[in-house]
Amino acid sequence: MRATSISIGIGQYLHEEYAKSDMRLHFAQDDAQAFSLYARGADDVDDSDTRHRLLVDGEADWDGVRLAATQIAAAGRPDLFLLYLSGHGEAGVAPTGGWFCLVDAKPGEPSLTGSRIEELLRIVDASNTLLIVDCCFAEALIGRCDFFRHLQNSRARFAVASARADQRSWEDSGLKRSVFSDVLIRSLSVGSAVADASGHVDVERALFPALREQVPLLASSRKDGAIQEPVTAGMATQEIRLPTVFGRSLGRPLSVSEAIRSGVKRFLVAAAVVLVATLAGLDALVYHLAFRPLGRSSSVPA
């Protein structure tokens, strides 16, 4: 798969409101770096430096983000474009919706809005697009993105928001990552509990359900009962299957329990395939290749 990506992580904001101790984000940069490494690992083409951009802190203003999209588009139409955002978000006011806060954002003033997101996605013009937004009130952003309501010349357009329009998106010092991105990265790592036998994760049928199930559980257990519910959107004429990559290379190895569970799952799948093939072979030998006394084959059971 010829993949491209822009991964944005902002913790060091210019405005003092976002830089205050109770507002400061501690892991957004690392989460973006981990996702950028994932995107590179999922890419089948060697010249990944020209098609995968990591924008951290001061690099992540509108001019920098738009330039990255333009440079990626210049390399030709990709099979898959991944846009990952980790930072602050604001809910905004209807009907304009919310926005993701770029590094120079000011409280109450729209920054990376749904219309700007749509501009970026149309510049790249990928066959398949996946937008991942990890910020407070993230649904308020993707809900105003018309891009995901029409396919036009694309095969798939999907978006996932880390929280509903009235919910916070949590970080956790124990995880050293945001709650949402921790589940995301683990789901896309080798040994993932939601990967199929070939080591791929179906975005719509496996990844999205895992995020909707696991993020609320993790947020509630880690953040004193906090409610955080991811929201998904989009449509497709065919599935998007993402490869898994080694979790250690993304800065987060699987836990022992996850590795064991994954190994057992893969063993059971392989065993089931062998069992079905064996039974089919026995069925053919016993029931469909029985011989009459004259030596001619018979199609009736023995």
Image (spheres, helix red, strand yellow):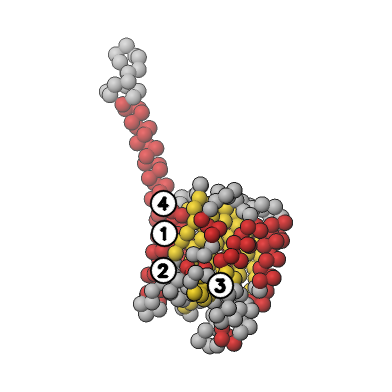
**Which residue is found at the position 55% from the left and 51% from the top?**
151
The Cα atoms of the two marked residues, 3 and 4, are separated by 42 Å
Q: Mark 2 points at which residue?
A: 229
**Which residue is found at the position 69% from the left and 70% from the top?**
63
Please tell me which of labels 2 and 1 falls first in the chain.
1
Please tell me which of labels 2 and 3 falls first in the chain.
3
Q: Can residue 43 be seen in this snapshot?
A: no
When the figure is inspected, residue 240 is found, relative to residue 167, above or below; the finding is above
Q: What element carries label 3?
A: strand
When the figure is inspected, residue 282 is found, relative to residue 269, above or below; the finding is above
Closer to us: mark 1 or mark 4?
1
Please tell me which of labels 2 and 4 falls first in the chain.
2
Q: What element carries label 1?
A: helix
The Cα atoms of the two marked residues, 3 and 1, are separated by 24 Å
Is 269 in front, or is 12? 12
Q: What element carries label 4?
A: helix
When the figure is inspected, residue 72 is found, relative to residue 299, above or below; the finding is below
The Cα atoms of the two marked residues, 2 and 3, are separated by 18 Å
Closer to us: mark 2 or mark 4?
2
Q: Mark 1 points at which residue?
A: 209
The amino acid type of the residue labelled 2 equals Glu
